Amino acid sequence: MKIKLKIWRQKNAKAKGKFVNYTLDDVSPEMSFLEMLDALNSKLILQDDEPVAFEHDCREGICGCCGLYINGRPHGPGEKTTTCELHMRSFKDGQTIVIEPWRAKAFPVIKDLIADRNAFDKIIIAGGFVSVNAGSAPEANSILIKKKNADEAFDSAACIGCGACVAACKNASAMLFISAKISQLTLLNQGKVEAMERVQAMVAKMDELGFGNCTNTYACEAECPKGIKVTNIARMNREFIAAKVS
Amino acid sequence: MAKLDSKIPGGPLSKKWSTYKSSMKLVNPANKKKLDIILVGTGLAGSAAASSLGELGYNVKVFCFQDTPRRAHSVAAQGGINAAKNYKNDGDSVYRLFFDMIKGGDFRAREANVYRAAEVSNATIDHLTASGVPFAREYGGTLDNRSFGGVQVSRTFYAKGQTGQQCLLGAYSSLKRQISKGTVKMFSRREMLEIVIINGKARGIITRNLVTGEIERHSGHAVILATGGYGTIYYLSTLAVNSNASAAWIAYKNGAFFGNPSFVQIHPSSIPVLNDYQAKLTLMSESLRNDGRVWVPKKKGDKRPANDIPEEERDYYLERKYPAYGNLVPRDVGSRAAKERCDAGYGVGDTGLAVNLDFKDAIAKQGKKAIEDKYGNLFEMYEKITGINSYEEPMRIYPAGHYTMGGLWVDYNLMTTITGLFAIGEANFSDHGANRLGASSLMQCSGDGYFIIPNTITNYLADKIRTPRIATDTPEFDEAEKTTKEKIDKLLSINGSKTVTFFHKQLGKIMWDYCGMARNEKDLKKAMELVNELQIEFWKDVKVPGTADELNQELEKACRVADFFEIAKLMITDALNRKESCGAHFRKESQTETGEAMRIDKEYSYVSAWEYKGIDNPPHLHKEELKFENVEVKVRDYK
Ligand SMILES: Cc1cc2nc3c(=O)[nH]c(=O)nc-3n(C[C@H](O)[C@H](O)[C@H](O)COP(=O)(O)OP(=O)(O)OC[C@H]3O[C@@H](n4cnc5c(N)ncnc54)[C@H](O)[C@@H]3O)c2cc1C
Ligand code: FES
């Protein structure tokens, strides 16, 4: 396959970025998207050009490192697929592919296709945990949890923190990310004790960090590679209101 | 010359740890905050340690090279985490878990450490559950278990095929809680490039800020490495692609002995190599073998689609050869059996380097929904990569590099031979002998982090409370910084004609072909020559673009690959030295008539602990003799 690439290049956080065009002539449909970028980088290096910086680690859809905005969609055209799981067979011979970093006020670009998603860590620091010290936990089976709740909590906990939800949202809202964590911890008995403080602290932090509001477009759910549902947001809103009135 | 002392406490096996804890030295809460601990690595081992040390009140500085601790490689662990809860009432106990690990490791691990790992496993499950890890549950609300290879009980806790993710996120959230309390300070996007030793004690590290390129100095009263394994030496492996050996290697070059470097686990079930631009192999969890059956056609070179091959023409070779354990034999046995069938010409797929993992019978018996509930994400992952729906036809799998049992040699305190330098998790050599059993790494990592290191480091720090904060403007820091900068400058100045990845791929291939699943003297010697040649070429002809003072991913890779060459040679040296087969280390010269690994206990019942003697000298071998007082040393038999 022949592929035309239009890639966002930006030297560092302070520099102004721009799109640069490249072509690759011998792309195999079996290549993963990141392997295609590896091939581009090898070519650039040997031509004395600077390779394109992008983040990746597990390359199997679980670490949340990779996250490219491909042809106007976070993680590209695949359903429930991270960038690293995307394969070139999803593109056509001769197609132009536009690749950008996540764009959001809370996620500044550091270099080329790498955005700083540290704001997610800050939200977790604000309250995304259960306050239990090692050594003080009760016997695991002494806390019974309905299978249905455990399964639902797992579905929310499957979030990989990639930030696609923020990148997909026209308001750059982090509601899906936060609500998934809040849902997970409120669905489990262990997390209930601090539920009210948690939701208030996390929402306040989100506002402070410059994430936008949720206006119910559901773009986040549509683009989430792990299928995290917007029903989490509804649950969080209920929790938030309950915390406010109590 | 440093002497090997494993510092195993006296007394009966089952009392050693409790005796240790009740007699160890303590640090009072007010003094803890005056003590700085440097912790490199935020996988399950590192995050667990960071949170519990923070909870104790120490001042902890934590480092990782990813943008956030939550992305450490532990996140990719799939199948589960073991504990001796005996929830299934199937005869499990701490002793049995200990025994299974000793036997699974082919009698090459230290009894006392393994027993302790089994002993703290139950508290780990309690803690992770309390931290909000959504483990799978039964309808009555209790926790569910499944089986893993090499054992006959069900003791594995799991969260679908994402157990590592869930455990790591549990530990990560506790780590974040400590950040909110101010006990832990997080330094992400930092790569440790040197260790600073002052008067024989580990006192700090040199890091490179991966965004700005700045070389930074950090000091502490003790240093812990939780930097994971080096399976990426094979280039293609199931590990996250940035996992590397460098931190442990730097420790080795500064005087920490390296234990059993050649003990590498090749996992039997990964998605096979599909093409040569591939950068990574994806694991299909061992848990799948609870329900999947492994087979190849009975006829050589049978290229019919799997579903067209009738039942009587299939060879379920694991069930045939190992009826007692069947598809759940330990990994080393399963991998060699797959290699044997493929080498003999029975492999499937285009390359013939694959075997079938078939769920047909399980689906017929339990229904598709039940299988989807247990392994849904793995089936999805498989389909995304191969385009094949394995509810309908078998998965194809082949062995791949997966885990390193070898690592920094540590004593019972998890301290290396450098005073004040500790190693936990996959980075140490400690608990798995010559072969690790499934679901026991997450167990070891969390046990090390939550429950062991907080005690042993306290015992070490107890007499350091009068040592003031360590200054970083000392000659030792100057020297360490200089070494780091020299290495970086040298790599950048070569400006050759081949990429770093080119070299990594070549090195990986040499190691896979000659120091992988089966080894012999001739091949190992050949490998040594080839690695030497390639290493020379690397230092002459590698091309590392860009500069040192910017985000430069090629430079990061180059530093790691430069170290891979060196560790490759130590792996080969170790594999050459050990002329027996044991666990995953299979020397073709030492096998039984039926092709099983043959140990030579009289000569090799020891841990090899290698000491660095300078770049131009061969390393020196120290032997930690293994004493088995609580198990009978037998031929490992899974038939
Ligand atoms: C695909 C896969 C599936 C697995 N499934 C299971 C399973 O089901 N059950 C099980 O028990 N085990 C499993 N394992 C094994 C297990 O996941 C690992 O052994 C374990 O997670 C290792 O954890 P760790 O904390 O020691 O290190 P890691 O999780 O590898 O973390 C290493 C950390 O060190 C940091 N680091 C490394 N070097 C440096 C440096 N120089 N400077 C700064 N930071 C550094 C990294 O940033 C990272 O934070 C699996 C392994 C693989 C590959
Ligand atoms: S690289 Fe880990 S999710 Fe894509």
Image (cartoon, coloured by chain):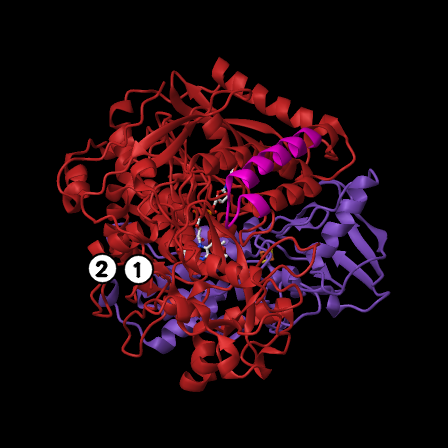
Chain colours: A purple, B red
Does B248 appear in magenta? Answer: no
Magenta-highlighted residues: B513-537
- The N terminus of chain B, quarter of image: top left
Q: Residues within 10 Å of mark 2 (few under 14, many from 20)?
A: few
Residue B353 falls in image quadrant: bottom right
* Above or below A55: residue B523: above
Horizontal and vertical percent position of residue A54: 68, 49
Secondary structure, magenta segment, majority class: helix
Residue A141 falls in image quadrant: bottom left
Horizontal and vertical percent position of residue A105: 65, 53
Residue designated by label 1: B130
Mark 1 touches mark 2? (CB < 8 Å): yes
Residue B423 falls in image quadrant: top left
* Above or below B453: residue B86: below
Which of the numbered marks, if any, corresponds to residue A138?
2
**Residue type at numbered disc 1:** Ala
* Residue in front for this viewpoint, B554 or A230: B554
* Above or below A188: residue B197: above
Q: What residue do we see at 79% from left, 35% from top?
A: B497
Horizontal and vertical percent position of residue B376: 49, 73
Query: Which SS class for mark 2?
Result: loop
The answer to whether residue B337 is seen in the rendering is yes
**Residue type at numbered disc 2:** Pro
